[in-house]
C-alpha cells in the first residue's frame, strides 16, 4: 500500500506529528515515544528502533536485505540518492 504523499514529506522535512517535533514547538509536551519506550519519538525511533513497529518493518527489512541497501531513515524516506529509482519506488510502496 502506498502511503499518502504528505506522510513521506512530513517524515523527510521533520515537521511531522511525532512527539519530538511537538516538543520543539511546545516545550511542555512530552517528547518520548507514545508506546512508552524510554526513547525520544522521532523519525529514527518510529521507523527503525521502536519495537512496537517491528512487525510492520519485516517487509522493509526483507527488501533492504535483498537489495543490499541500508535500513535507515534516509533510505526509507527516499533521500538516499545512491539508490536507483526502481528500488526507491519499491521501498516507497
Ligand atoms: Zn517506541
Image (tube, grey):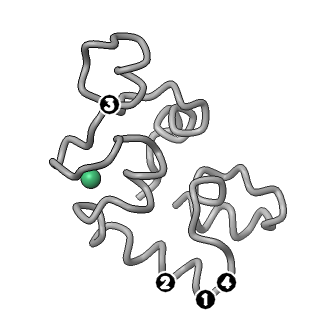
**Disc 2 to disc 3, C-alpha distance:** 28 Å
Point out residue 88 in the picture as x, y percentages from the top left corner. Answer: 68, 62
Q: Are marks 2 and 4 in contact (CB under 8 Å)?
A: no
The Cα atoms of the two marked residues, 4 and 3, are separated by 32 Å
Alpha carbons under labels 4 and 1: distance apart: 4 Å
21 vs 63, left or right, is left
- For mark 2, what is the residue? 62
The reply to whether the C-beta atoms of the residues labelled 2 and 1 are less than 8 Å apart is yes
Distance in Å between CA atoms under marks 2 and 4: 9 Å
Q: Is residue 62 left or right of residue 81?
A: left
Q: Nearer the viewer, mark 4 or mark 3?
A: 3
Q: Where's residue 53, x and y in %?
A: 28, 62
Residue shown at the point (32%, 30%) measured from the top left = 19
- Residue beneath label 4, please? 67
**What residue is drawn where x is 35% and y is 41%?**
40
**Which mark sits nearer the N-terminus, 2 or 3?**
3
Which secondary structure lies at badge 2? helix
Q: Nearer the viewer, mark 2 or mark 3?
A: 3
Q: Residues within 10 Å of mark 1 (few under 14, many from 20)?
A: few
**In this orientation, which residue lies closer to the viewer: 27 or 54?**
27
The span from disc 2 to disc 1 (Cα, nearest Å) is 6 Å
Say which residue appears at 60% left-offset and 50% top-offset. 77
First-in-chain label (4 vs 3): 3
| Residue under numbered circle 3 | 19
Residue 41 image-quadrant placement? top left
Query: Is disc 1 placed on a helix, strand or loop?
Result: helix
Q: Are dots 4 and 1 in contact, CB under 8 Å?
A: yes
Q: Residues within 10 Å of mark 2 (few under 14, many from 20)?
A: few
Residue at x 24% of width, y 26% of height: 30
Where is the N terminus found, in terms of image quarters?
Answer: bottom left
**Residue beneath label 1, please?**
66
Amino acid at each position: 500500500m502506498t502511503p499518502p504523499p504528505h506522510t513521506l514529506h512530513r517524515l523527510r522535512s521533520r515537521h511531522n506529528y511525532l512527539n519530538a517535533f511537538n516538543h520543539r514547538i511546545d516545550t511542555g509536551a512530552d517528547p518520548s515515544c507514545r508506546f512508552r519506550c524510554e526513547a525520544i519519538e522521532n523519525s529514527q525511533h518510529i521507523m527503525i528502533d521502536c519495537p512496537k513497529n517491528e512487525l510492520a518493518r519485516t517487509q522493509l527489512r526483507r527488501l533492504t536485505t535483498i537489495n543490499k541497501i541500508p535500513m535507515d531513515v534516509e533510505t526509507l524516506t527516499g533521500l538516499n540518492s545512491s539508490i536507483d529509482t526502481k528500488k526507491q519506488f519499491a521501498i516507497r510502496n
